[in-house]
Amino acid sequence: PPSITLPFKVLATETINRKALDADIYNAIPTEKVDGTCCYVTTYKGQPYLWARLDRKPNKQAEKRFKRFLYSVEDSKEFIWNIEEDFKPIPECWIPAKEIQQSNGNPLPDENGHIPGWVPVEKNSKQYCWHSSVVNYEAEIALILKQHADDPGLLEISPMPLSDLLEQTLELIGTNINANPYGLGSKKHPIHLLVPHGAFEIKNPPMLKHSDILSWFEGCREGKIEGIVWHCNDGCLIKLHRHHLGLCWPIAETYLNSKPVAVNGTKYDCDCEPKCLFNHFSKLDGQRFNRLKDIKFDV
């Protein structure tokens, strides 16, 4: 469905905005912004489940009204939504995202007219088949890509109990997500992985100056990423995308896909089909690859 495109391009200014200063961005932890689709782990049917991002979007009539409001010259204060009538229907199990504002117990749309939220990923879901490939609900585990605990230069792919991920958001990356910027897997043998948000701390971040950030993205290996997310002490997240600086993404070689990776702890008994991702990774248990994008399944 066509999303509402605003009549301007978002570009970073030379100065740090008030919100970032109030959140104390100078003492925040800079992390790699990973390019995938956002997921959430919370309880469903009494057990920890992976949930996919699904935004409630306005129907045609409401979208027209909203666009007229956006493009209108008058300085009208705010757009009034009718939550009951303005939005397309969504599945009954849909829940709104936690961080969105509420009014009279109803979630309020964001500046794009969307209400961010989540739907649970069922075991054999066709619509969310790549999401469901990274979880095993019988064993209650998820396939996670993260920094290796003992070696800062090494990535690790390992299963993690879904109960350890409760109330966390993660990024699903891989072959069939966002045109596969990290070059994972292949059409015949797709590879998908979950990355907990904030998993990759940036070791040598740029100074918080426009020119320094620009040259960091363009000039160093650690800068070959989609963007930076600063995790502030008050829980606030400040995001900067390469596009905000007029830079390209995706790029040919990324920092993430060029790092070495170890596959650990994937060998255990679980009832899953021979073609399932967990089965493929169990055959690679204990192996190391020079680069993340070198992982291939010999079938």
Image (cartoon, rainbow, N blue to C red):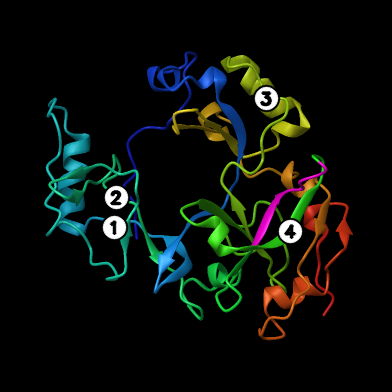
Q: Give the mark nearer the N terminus: 2 vs 4.
A: 2
Report the residue marked by disc 4: 157
Is residue 248 something that shows in the picture?
no
Select label 2 or label 4 by which is in front. 4
Image: 44 above or below 155: below
Q: Position of residue 73 (x, y in %)?
A: 16, 28
Q: Quadrant of the C terminus?
A: bottom right
Badges 1 and 4: C-beta atoms under 8 Å apart? no
**In the image, what residue occupies the spot 54% across and 56% down?**
165
**In the image, what residue occupies the spot 69% across and 73% down?**
277
Q: Tag on residue 114?
A: 2
Select label 3 or label 2 by which is in front. 3
Report the residue marked by disc 1: 56
- Residue type marked 3: Pro
Q: Give the mark nearer the N terminus: 3 vs 2.
A: 2
Q: CA distance from mark 3 to mark 1?
A: 36 Å
Q: Give the mark nearer the N terminus: 3 vs 4.
A: 4
Badges 3 and 2: C-beta atoms under 8 Å apart? no
Helix, strand or loop at mark 2: loop
Residue span colored magenta = 143-151
Select label 1 or label 4 by which is in front. 4
Report the residue marked by disc 3: 205
**In the image, what residue occupies the spot 81% across and 44% down?**
150
Q: Give the mark nearer the N terminus: 1 vs 4.
A: 1
